[in-house]
Amino acid sequence: MAGLIRREDIDEVRTRTDLKEIVDAYVTLKSAGIGSFKGLCPFHDERSPSFHVRPQMGYFHCFGCQESGDVISFIQKMDHISFSEAVEKLAGRIGYELRYEDGGTGPRREDIGRRQRLLDAHKIAGEFFRQQLLTPAAAAGRQFLAERGFDRDAAEHFGVGFAPQGWDALLKHLTGKGFSHDELKLTGMFSEGQRGIYDRFRGRLIWPIRDIAGDTVGFGARRLFEDDQGPKYLNTPETVLYKKSQVLYGIDLAKKSIASKRQLVVVEGYTDVMACHLAGVDTAVATCGTAFGADHIKVSRRLLSDDGTGGEVVFTFDGDAAGQKAALKAFDEDQRFVAQTFVAVEPSGADPCELRQTKGDEAVHALIRSRRPLFEFAIRSTLAKFDLSTVEGRVSGLRASAPVVAAIRDGSTRMGYSQELAGWLGLADPNEVLRAVKNAERRLHTAPEGKGAGRTQPGAAVGHGQAPAHGQQAHGQARAAQGAPDGAAGPAVAVMARPDPRDPQGRMEREALEVVLQQPGFLTPGNWQHFAATEFVVPAYKAVQQAIGVAGQSQAASSQWLEAVRENVPPELGSLVAELALSPLPATGEETLARYCRDILRRLFELQITRLKEERLGALQRMDPAVDPAGYQLLQRELMELEVARRQLRGDG
């Protein structure tokens, strides 16, 4: 049973992981001052670098799109995985064994090590196949690609390779790299006979199948030679790494575009994905030898941010009977999405690869633009089976299509298609269709378990407006994040506005918070007391100051301490904490940095003393010493103490 990861283990993984090393795999970073690096943001398109990383603090922030966080949230955002998955991935990377609450379990250390060995074997195998594509023996493979409009650059971009025709070319290569036969048996790249294991893929064109993080977990192989008696396409069998119901070919290349464009295009084959991407439809992916199912939808929802605010899924199918059957199968899964779902069918039966070959890139775009709502396609495909020019055909068509309409979960959409169906049937009275749909809906609700009832019940599927829970919350607390039920409206919460950094009133407060968050080690115990006593004027900065007080004094900025600060500000100010913690300070060395920090703190405290003196002077002017001589003397004493404190700050006494 999967459990919640212990908080101390989460903190340990966060502390032990080098943020810069992780970010370097995705972003080219350059030095940006003392302990700071910057590069082009991976979360939005930009020409000038505004993405900053502070490895010592374990934090990143983009001053352009306001994305920010620690190494765990960075992996979450880049690989579109849950909090728990990100922690487990990072723990596996550093060889740290996680502990779980409530008797739950996670991957064991030996399992993590075995998985990494399998990933390493796949990586080396992929490199081997790519090298083999350049050899004379792979001429048939290069010809296959060229005939479909794919040049050498395209093959390299998608990692296409070639498996030699011998029985043990890959086997010898991997054993030469130190892999044992027992390890290689677990990869799915080898078959086993009486004499031991031998290459599963021989004399075939090879496509690497990668997971969303970009790790190769399997291969797809296309037959090239007539003497090959195997199937046209041969994939890796189910392994520890490769689950065909979960992988999507091309997801590693398409994930960024899917997330930014809020579109997912599902095609049928490897070459279709290649053709779409080369034509500019870079949101295309393909299933690997199975129908698009519930596990694929889970992956897709994360990329689409499938929360009811937009996004679309487009299924492309051939216009033949098999293509229509596949589209109707997709209809069964459609309502697990909140995003709008469409079908794009090419009447000629050409797939995207063939379209690009014969008609060019624009034809591929035109196919996607021709998409129709999946509900409409499903209903019209059902009606196409009947002769609607006859009374009998219309009656039969209504009986067959009413359950399709009844299966639409959203009430407004169901009503709209009921009215459309009346028009498609040529019925003058739409109430006849509404009655048939209502009857079909009742039958769906009362159907026995496994006979259709689940299609209109929430069950395991996520209904419209309800986001799935993805395990632990992103801020790192070891508890499950629950989605809100349909239509549930929580209490109105006042949102605190982010301050304008150019506002002169808040400039001093902002600069002081930057120093405290970035260089807390410069603060003496007395500085911490003065800082806590300072009255901040700007509400957002005051909230950050109070959160620092809750997090407690720190001798060094760290991801754990900053996370504690972030947890104690309103959610809308989380990125402000990261922005303050990563804003470059105007210092060129340790000496100038120390001087700057001392000056900023002195000015902040002096400003506080000035405010307090103004308050006391005003009160003194309003007071009659004859009426309250004790109070008058107290105010004078306080003014004197404030002046002494001011002189001490200035070094005058």
Image (cartoon, rainbow, N blue to C red):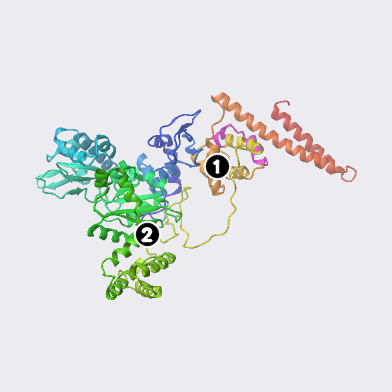
- Distance (Cα) linking label 2 and label 1: 35 Å
- Quarter of the picture containing the C terminus is top right
Residue 245 drawn at (x, y percent): 28, 54
Residue 103 drawn at (x, y percent): 39, 55
Residues 325 and 479: in front is: 325
User: Of callouts 2 and 1, which one flags the residue occurring earlier in the amino acid sequence?
Assistant: 2
Residue 626 drawn at (x, y percent): 90, 43
Q: Is residue 161 magenta?
A: no
Residues 327 and 630: in front is: 327
> Is 197 displayed left or right of 375 in the figure?
left
Would you say the residues marked 2 and 1 are in contact, meaning their CB atoms lie under 8 Å apart? no
What is the span of residues highlighted in magenta in the rendered image? 517-535
Amino acid found under the numbered disc labelled 1 = Leu
Q: Secondary structure at mark 2?
A: loop
- Residue picked out by circle 1: 576
Q: Residue at the right extreme?
A: 626
- Residue picked out by circle 2: 336
